[in-house]
Image (tube, helix red, strand yellow):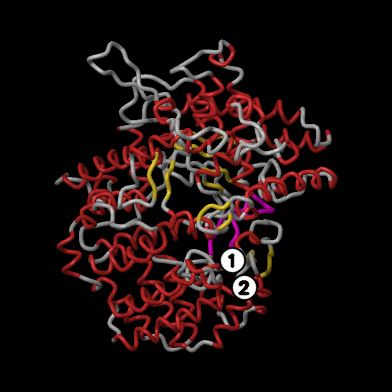
Amino acid sequence: MKSRFIHFSFLLLATIVVSCTNPSKKDQTFDALASHIDSTVKPGTDFFLFANGKWFKEHPIPASEPNNGLWQLIQDTINAQIRNICESSAALKDSKIGSAKQKIGDFFFTGMDSLALNRKGISDLKDDLERIDGIKDMNGIVKEAAYIHSVSGSPLFDFWVTQDDRISSKNAIFFSQGGLSLPDRDYYIDVDPRTVMIRDKFIVYVANIYKIMGQDEATAKKSAAQLMKLETALAKAARKREDTRDPLKNYNKLSLKQFAETTPNFNWSVFMESTGLHNVDTVIVGQPEFLRSVNGFLKSYSLNDWKSYLKFHLFSGLARYMDDKTYMESFSFYNTILRGVKEPKPRWKRVVGQTDGSLGELIGQVYVNEYLPKGTKEKLLEIGNAIKTVYAERMKNLDWMSEATKKKAIEKLNAVIMKVGYPDKWKDLSSMQIDRSSYVHNVMSANKWAFNYMISKYGKPVDRTEWNMEPQTYNAYYNPSNNEIVVPGCNIIVPGYERKLADDALLYSVIGGSTFGHEITHGFDDQGSKYDEKGNLHNWWTPEDSARFYKKTGMIVKQFNGYIAVDSLHINGSLTQGENIADLGGIVMGYEAFRKTNQYKNNEIIAGLTPDQRFFLGYGLAWMVNERPEAIANQIKSNEHSPAKFRVLGPLTNMPEFYQTFGIKKGDPIWRPDSLRVKIW
């Protein structure tokens, strides 16, 4: 399912417990914060490496991963639990047809059956490829594009059904720019050496995919060059990613008749009927100029060009679920070239991840019953409510916001819905057909179910109880149209360290700041601030307050523009500003809430560290991620989140308490003068 303006943030867990016993030394306690410190680095030189450097030295990035760190360790633990669910389900001989364990077991079995996969090759897609070859006109292209949207990828444009930004109680149809095989438009346009290399490698990858589909070498090279030409045209017609961040500019509601008149070469009636949408009256278009360009391309490129384009998008989107040769072509480009990963994960990890991705709702039901501790919801709500209380206090005392806008801001804050742990009701996946005949068909069936579920929302009232994550998903999000934050239950567990909770310094820096504080702040970042307490796109600010707000957000854009992440690539401060604002707001709120705890008030020293030291080191631990240069470069060009290092340095260097705690002074590399320190919420 596609989602719009939903902010996802990697989280750390609430119960970080790092104690172990050396039998030769009585009650000797191991502390993660103290043990990870690299004493060869001064805090004022690079606090990120000071806090985490020793761990990085002792744990190099595995060849099968783009990074290594706490996220990976915790995800590995969750994957091991899901593996148990998958393997035990696959071993059952009498599962009821249609039950959760039958579907989980059969899906996992087909993914693990490498002999069958290699024997079949690409034969399971033979009928689909032949159908595309048989297309006779542009209506056939339109119909096939709709089909591929439902099972594999997003050719031509992005498309989804979700809440109307201005009427959050209703579902609407959205179209926006898309249709690319590389992660972002800039990969087709930029001329830096790394990007040029990636483009060259991409053309080789595309040609290899066409050869796997049966073309001879000369024809495959020609097809690849033509696809690159077509996608480059799409890329040049698209807005820069940072220019798509304004939801007001992305909201262009048109009647279906108006939309059809602006794009007459595309038969929208055929597309709607092919997707299962009926009686469509209006659509919302994110970037109208892009769709107008697509309309022109439908004439300027031949029918054969479009057939070749659709075959590639169908096949490339499903390449990972077929034989080893096809899988490795996809892996070599999208993982090795783009992200620097040297070798694939073991098959079981890949299949566990895909089973969870496709059947996450079913996995979640088993996971909650078998792995999630009781009391998870209550503990998460306790910390979340503490953060909301602090947020309200700070809002009331803001010196840059008028009383009228403060009132609206607090109304919105009080209305924030916190969904934690797991949903009270589960989605009905009974219509999804899963068996042991074909792995790629099982993936397509799951994709088709998710697509149809999305389509079914059109014309129905919005279900505000719905979750868009599963309880075993190590992540969280804020949805501005619902004015809600969602924190799955697995974010409270560290497998193997269940014997006690971490101290409050960790709890409030990690789950208080990096989770609840971060997600709540998304309701007041450069995008979320445009939605009111009911989730409607509505300006609730006075003009003067808006001007002051954007002056402050402009400062954080400038701050992050100055960071060089890898090679000569600077972070894109405009693209990442929403996440950077949320990181800053989150850690400030986490710190304020921590100051109310007994640990802080009593100045408890743990492992030789003061409460303040533990809090800020805890925030460093939350982003303890060592990333490959290739992965960082890919992230800079295509992701709204800053690299982990700068998610630590950026927010902390705006907090005077951080400087005081570690004695950071003028002249230190990370020091920032008062005039440049950003304070928003």
The percent position of residue 542, horizontal first and vertical second, equals: 83, 44
The percent position of residue 58, horizontal first and vertical second, equals: 33, 37
Dots 1, 2 in contact, CB < 8 A: yes
The percent position of residue 407, horizontal first and vertical second, equals: 78, 33
- The magenta span reads 159-174
| Nearer to me, 192 or 389 | 192
| Nearer to me, 195 or 460 | 195
| Residue at the image point whose x is 31% and y is 68% from the top | 329
| Residue at the image point whose x is 49% and y is 83% from the top | 139
Q: In this figure, which residue is indicated by the disc labeled 1?
A: 176
Left of 425 or right of it: where is 253? right
The percent position of residue 561, horizontal first and vertical second, equals: 64, 53
Q: In this figure, which residue is indicated by the disc labeled 2?
A: 290
Give the spatial CA distance, label 1 vs label 2: 8 Å
Q: Earlier in the sequence, mark 1 or mark 2?
A: 1
Q: Secondary structure at mark 2?
A: helix
Q: Residues within 10 Å of mark 1 (few under 14, many from 20)?
A: many
| Residue at the image point whose x is 83% and y is 33% from the top | 403
- Against 43, residue 133 (above or below) is below
Which amino acid lies under the numbered mark 2 shown in the image of this protein?
Phe
| Residue at the image point whose x is 72% and y is 41% from the top | 676
Q: Quadrant of residue 129?
A: bottom left
**In the rendered image, which quarter contains the C terminus?**
top right
| 169 magenta-colored | yes
Q: Residues within 10 Å of mark 2 (few under 14, many from 20)?
A: many
| Nearer to me, 405 or 257 | 405
Q: Secondary structure at mark 1?
A: strand
Q: How many marks?
A: 2
- Against 221, residue 206 (above or below) is above
Query: What label sits on residue 513 in the rendered view?
Result: none
Which amino acid lies under the numbered mark 1 shown in the image of this protein?
Ser
| 343 magenta-colored | no
